[in-house]
Each structure stands twice: as structure tokens, then as C-alpha cells.
Amino acid sequence: MRFAVILCLGASVAFGAPPPTSETKPKAIVTPAQVSKWVRMWQKRLHLDDWKVEVRMVRITDLKPDTLGNLKWNSNLRTATIKVLNSVDYDISAAEVPEDIEYTVVHELVHLQLSVLPRDLNRKDVEEQVVNKIADALMALDRGDGFHARSAPVKPYKEETGDRGSEFAGRQAR
């Protein structure tokens, strides 16, 4: 009887989990606490301490197509919400995900820093290029020669309109 129980348990364990395949990529896990830590660190570095910045890790369906994050801010209230793509939805190597999420945080905070400037909604692509280059420079200064720049030509996209007093910006996927 003992043998039958052990045999059944062994079979259920052996057949219960699919064998690993070469197509299965391990997913990097970046926690909301880690993302919040990056927000606070970069917020301080960019002298945005007078802003209340909330960060949310969201699934790919909660972002516009081809984006990795976005920012919504209210200049009057000095509040902002950053959404970053959850690490489980990334399709790059697990080793690259944490740095890419941190880059998205920096990118969105640079948008926030530039929010005091007048915006030309017809030339949003120019703002994205400038923000990408500034974020690249900041990350390169922080990480050194090992940092892989992410700025690339930006696809023009239609600007969203939100509540009065609110603005939107977002980081596009490569």
C-alpha cells in the first residue's frame, strides 16, 4: 500500500509540471517597493521634492500601445502619477528589465521637470527625443560605461486630452 501511495505521488509530481523548454524565458521580478525607491531617489536628484509623486506598476493593457510607461501630472496641485510596465510583461531578457524600468522612471521624471515649459502638442515627438537624450545622459552618469542608451527616433503620436489642469506624457517602447 505504501508503495502505491509513493508511486502515485511521484507520478503526480513528475507529470504535474511541464518540462522547461528553451522557449520559456525566466521573468525578472521588480517589486513596487523597488520602483518606489527609484522614484524617490531620482525625484531627489532632479529636485522634484516639492511634488507628490505616486508610482504604479501596471499591466501592458493599462498603457497605450507601444509604451513602457506614462506620466500624468497636475501643476496646480503639484501631484503626479507615474505608470510603469510590470516586469512580467517585458519581452527583453530578465537581466535587462530592472534597468529598463528604472530608465522609464527617470524618463517620466524628466517630463515632470520640463512640465513648467510651454508645450507644443503638435511636436510631441521633439519633446520625447529631448527627454530620451536627457534620461540617457543621467543614467549614463549614474551607471557608467556599462549603460546602454535607449534614445532612438521617436514615432509621432496623438496627444491625449485629460481633465483641466492635467497633462500627459509617456515613454515609448523601442
Image (tube, rainbow, N blue to C red):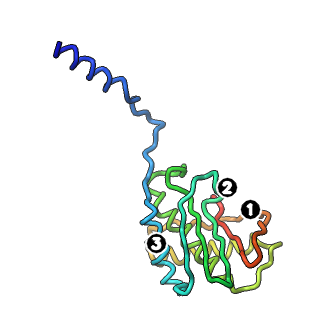
Of residues 23 and 66, the one drawn nearer to the viewer in this rendering: 66
**Residue drawn where x is 46% and y is 72% of the image:** 38
C-alpha gap between disc 3 and disc 2: 23 Å
Residue 58 is tagged as none
Point out the frontmost of discs 1 and 2. 2
Circles 1 and 2, Cβ within 8 Å, touching? The answer is: yes
Q: In the figure, residue 153 lies in which quadrant?
A: bottom right
Circles 1 and 3, Cβ within 8 Å, touching? The answer is: no
C-alpha gap between disc 1 and disc 2: 10 Å
Point out the frontmost of discs 1 and 3. 3
On screen, residue 53 above or below 92: below
Q: Crowding at label 1, few (<14), some or many (≥20) Cα neighbours within 10 Å? A: some
Residue under numbered circle 3: 38
Residue 51 screen position, x and y as percent: 57, 83
Residue 20 screen position, x and y as percent: 40, 33
Of residues 6 and 77, the one drawn nearer to the viewer in this rendering: 77
Question: In the image as oriented, which residue stretches furthest toward the left?
Answer: 2
Circles 3 and 2, Cβ within 8 Å, touching? The answer is: no
**Residue drawn where x is 63% and y is 66% of the image:** 70
Residue under numbered circle 2: 66
- Secondary element at image label 2: loop
